[in-house]
Amino acid sequence: MGYYNIQEEKVFNSGHAACPGCSEALAIRYIINTLGPDSIGVVPPSCIAIISGPQPLSSMRMPVYQTTLEASAASATGISRALKAKGNDHTNVVVIAGDGGTYDIGFQSLSSAAERNEDFIYVCLDNEGYMNTGAQKSSSTPYLAYTTSTPSGKPTPKKNLAEIMAAHRIPYVATATTGYPEDLARKVARAKELKGTGLRFILVLTPCLDGWGVADHAGPKTSRLAVETGVFPLYEVEYGERYTLNFGSKGTPVQAYLSQQSRYKHLRPEQIQEIQSQVDANWERLRERFSVP
Amino acid sequence: MPEVIKEVPPIWTTGWTDILNTGTWRSAVPVHKKRPAPCHKACPVEGEIPVWTQLVKAEKYQEAWLALAANNPFPAVTGRVCHHPCEGSCNRGEYDGAVAINALEHYVGDLALQEGWSLPKPEKEREQRVLVIGAGPAGLSCAYRLRLEGYQVTVFEEKPEAGGVLRYGIPQYRLPKAVLAGEIKRLQELGISIETGRRFESYELEQYEQEYDAVFLAIGAGKAKSLPQFPSDKRVLNGLEFLARANQNDTIALGQQVVVVGGGSVAMDVARTARRLGSYVTVLALEDGEHLPAQTDEVTGALEEGIAITGGAMVQEVQSSERGLGLACVKVNLDPEAPPGVLKPVVVPGSEFSLIADQVILAIGQDPETDVWNHLLPVKQTLFQIKPDFSTDRPGVFAGGDDASAERYVSSAIGQGKMAARSIARYLTGGSGSVDEEIVSLEEPVPFKDINTFYFPSQSRDYKGTTAAEQRVRDFSEVKTGFSSDQALAQAERCFSCGSCIECDNCFYFCPDMAVVKDATLEEHYRILDQYCKGCGSCVEECPRGAVVLKEESR
């Protein structure tokens, strides 16, 4: 693996308050270091707010607006339009929000901004729960995963946000994860390049070491297993139509992914089989979208 | 009371987090560290295998050869005849097949001969003289290492040509003479003087001890063992003599039916040579067919060539007649209770059978001719008694190779020659300097679990080509064909480079704290920023090859 496509500018600082080995910190590194200092960040309450602080210090060498949990996309809309009114066509506006602030609480403002095709980048760092407040379930929490509010496993499946965003027919939707830093950086660069076309949305799977119950060093490895088992395929969608697969299932049994995480340790073999069937069905459905050669 | 207007600053941030010291959170710190690869630990010459395979991968062939030759002056020879324990221990073996190290060595060794690359000259000349007795693999390896250090080295060889077992033992279909001659010539060009046809008698030792500063005895194991049930008859040959004659292209009339007694590498060489001379060959070995001491591909090669191998059998009696030698044989089992290294056959009652042979060739092992030396040097069970540094009881006299070890592999002899040279150099410099730093690494090799296989897409291993058996038995042409350059590159690509950093930058790119920095001035290429590293170990996990380790810290 080469890293020739990663062009980092030093925007993200060391000394931030993320946990040791944090996947979100690694993702933030490739998001803001790729966008560069001519960017304005919008961050709702989340781990990202902690990582970008603590006030009065900042880990991001760019202006960051900490908004309310429901209003990230609305805030970014305001900033983006204000910049345009001032004749600024170069500064990137980027929301970096968690899954709680995206799938649940910030969802209506995001959907409306997408419908209006507002010109900013929205990155959701998806760790599949309210991890900052002690691992409660969100609508991103996968089927049967343990959280403190779903002690016997979540009874409903994970909301498919990438497909929902693609259904808004915005210029760019991509999924990425921290085990593939070059792929992540390339997608951020692509989103940056598409400035002026409208809303660009990147969903980044960021395993929460504490919330998922994996070792401090296992973030990238867990993230790759999510891809190789077909749980979280990496792909891009342009205008809701053109699908491109980057990294998909290698046919690795989902058990390999689940067994790494203590949030799944209560699963019975038939439940693992059930998850496997769901993953297979989702993967098959997604595969149909990729352009036939 | 005047109204106080509290000014709200437009920007709340007053500084950056990089003034914080998140390094205090950690209890362990990553360390970039070269660790021994399992192939290197298994290699009898301590061959730094990951180093030269990476050079092959980078298509730096001459540098790869120099790295190879630094530990072994005979890459083209060992690329053919080494028993390659490296491949047996290769971590890739647990994944998708060991790296074809032996074939890569063969490729680089041949390239060096083709291109006429020469060995680096000694950096300085020294006046001290060393005499090496025996120009086999151990003797020449020792001579080479000492010459590299600038010592004046003379080698006495009894036979008309140098090479020892490589010249007179191993048949040409495994090791062509031109290959051996090329590698020996390179040693002579380095200034090693080889006096062939010069038998060294034990009584000369005292005189030569005066003339030379040190002596290395590497006389090999040239005396074939015999069996009492075989009569002294021209129809009974010993394997060493037979191979030596075949290797000098002597005409040997063997007759139609040849029986080879023995199950080791020499027995296979004898059987396959006899087959090439036109005979039908049966091998009788005490060990059962599955557990012959010969290397597997030698046994397979023999079977393909139509040689019959009867394992678990013993000759009890020999009847000599006009028609040939009548061998009364019996099936045996080896007593599993016997002490290690001792074969104790137990006859299977009622399993007698007989064979008629025009020629019997005994290949049941060989001993060094040490009996003439035992009044000068301690000898135990035919081997010179040496200390771990290869020295004998006589100051300045060292011994190694087959005359001091029962290991009996070409590469082991080369490795012993190398290590003996290190000790001789230390002796000659009064205990201080040495040929090179002692690399007696007590560290365990990198285990497979430390390899991150995500970074190594599955790629199957390749093997040397083999000429069809019916073609092979017609003459003594080489059986194995080496890799093409494409094959060599593809196979070098497969090396995990266990424990040796190749600057892939994974540790740099996977750090969430930007606490790993590249530093070209450092041998280990990277530095850990003490102020920021939280000790998560992502760099350790993401290092594909186990070249970063986590070290616990106590404060």
Image (cartoon, helix red, strand yellow):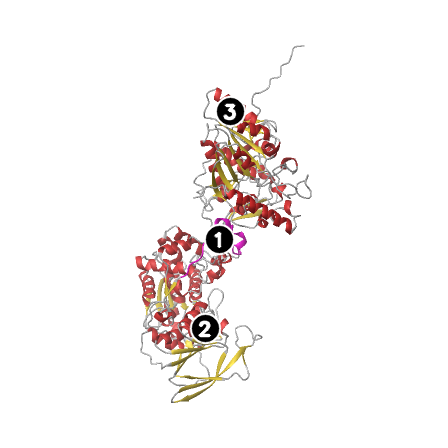
Given residues B398 and B416, the one toward you in this image is B416
Q: Label 3: chain?
A: A
**Numbered circle sitting on residue A80:** 3
Secondary structure mostly seen in magenta is loop
What is the C-alpha distance between the residues marked 1 and 3?
50 Å
Q: Is residue B86 magenta?
A: no
Q: Amino acid at mark 1?
A: Cys
Q: Where's the C terminus of chain B, which quadrant?
A: top right
Q: Is residue A76 depicted above or below B440 in this figure?
A: above
Q: Which residue is mark 2?
A: B264
Q: Which residue is mark 1?
A: B498
Q: Label 1: chain?
A: B
What is the C-alpha distance between the residues marked 3 and 2?
81 Å
Span highlighted in magenta in the image: B443-463
The furthest residue to the bottom: B322
Label 2 secondary element: loop
Asked whether the residues under marks 1 and 2 belong to the same chain, the reply is: yes
Given residues A232 and A290, the one toward you in this image is A290
Instruction: Point out the frontmost of discs 3 and 2.
Output: 3
Label 1 secondary element: loop
Residue A57 in the figure: left or right of residue B280: right
